[in-house]
Amino acid sequence: MKTIRSPSAMTTWSDQLHREGVVIGLVPTMGALHDGHRALIRTGRRQCDALVVSIFVNPTQFAPTEDLASYPRPIEQDRELCRTEGVDVCFEPAAGAMYPKGFQTLVTVPAIARRWEGQSRPHHFAGVATVVTKLFNVVRPGLAFFGQKDYQQCGVVRQLVKDLNFPIRIVVCPTVREQDGLAMSSRNVFLSTEDRRIAPIFFHALQAGRQAIENGLSEAASVEALMRKVIGGEPAIRIDYLAVCDPTTLEPLINIDRPAVILGAVRLGSVRLIDNVHARSTHGSRQHRQGLAARED
Ligand code: PAF
């Protein structure tokens, strides 16, 4: 496995492989790799001829009050995981190489980034969209792999790929969970023992919401109230948002008459957790079936 630090050396490597007709995959990460990243890497390995993992703790997606300085950086461990999984290149640029002095340009994807994470972390998605655009320009992959856990981020990336004409296929891989249901995240290491014990309640609440929708509850407000009740039993968990949304626009639904995604964010001590689940409304499918039947009549 090669380690490349300079963006221009990274592009030279990719251009050479393109000339040989090699399909390059990219797994963009901020390091502190866990089994969720491992699943992205394994999917990338299966679907591409050559695989690049970028490890870059991107400063522009952190607000000054957030955890940029303390974000975990176990680089040797990360390289070892990449080596074991057969990654071809670890791309590890320095912050100064990605954002040289005088850097000005930001990529923003306003509509899909507006709510949820965008509201709680106002500059976050401009930082993500900017660094992902830069990584795409530097690495020039044919496919890029992202985790469903960051659902809104996946929407932002899909939109920018479409709007900016990147010839890249975005592959979204399912969320990888601990045995008790907690979604894997690099920040889980910061949970205290007690907070780690209660953290899965967040996922239980999302599951309860999904179950209610699948059992026929069709008012988003009632589903949200139900999820709040599940979490309410645990005062250490502070809810940031829990919302039943359209899976594409991420706008909140009032009536759940079509497939939906339930998005959530909570705080446990100093750690912020995000997660999501898809839910298929029985009302939607019944209405959909009735619509089809009416058209056939
Ligand atoms: O999901 C992440 O780890 C980051 O937001 C990403 C996509 C690597 C951009 O810094």
Image (cartoon, helix red, strand yellow):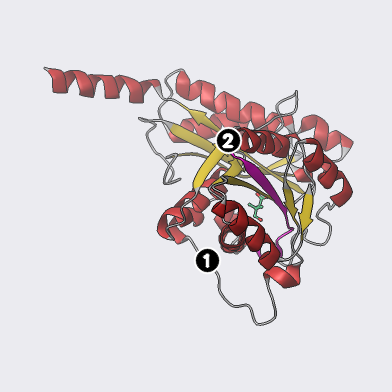
The answer to whether mark 2 is within 8 Å of ligand 1 is: no
Please state the extent of the stretch shown in magenta in the rendering: 48-61
Position of 42 relative to 297 (above/below): below
Hey, what amino acid is under mark 1? Val
Whole-percent x and y of residue 22? 57, 46
Identity of the residue drawn at 88% across and 35% down: 193
Residue 158 magenta: no
Residue extending furthest left? 297
- The one of 261 and 60 positioned closer to us in this rendering: 60
Q: Are marks 2 and 1 in contact (CB under 8 Å)?
A: no
Residue 233 appears in the rendering: no
Position of 146 relative to 219 (above/below): below
Q: Which mark is residue 204?
A: none
Q: Secondary structure at mark 2?
A: helix
Q: Quadrant of residue 56?
A: bottom right
Position of 199 relative to 62 (above/below): above
Q: Quadrant of residue 139?
A: bottom right
Q: Name which of mark 2 and mark 1 comes first in the sequence.
A: 2
Residue 54 magenta: yes
Identity of the residue drawn at 37% across and 30% down: 258
Hey, what amino acid is under mark 2? Gln
Q: Which mark is residue 47?
A: 2
| Real-space CA distance between mark 2 and mark 1, rounded to the nearest whole angstrom | 28 Å
Q: Nearer the viewer, mark 2 or mark 1?
A: 2
Reading the image, the residue beneath label 1 is: 107
Q: Is residue 259 left or right of residue 127?
A: left
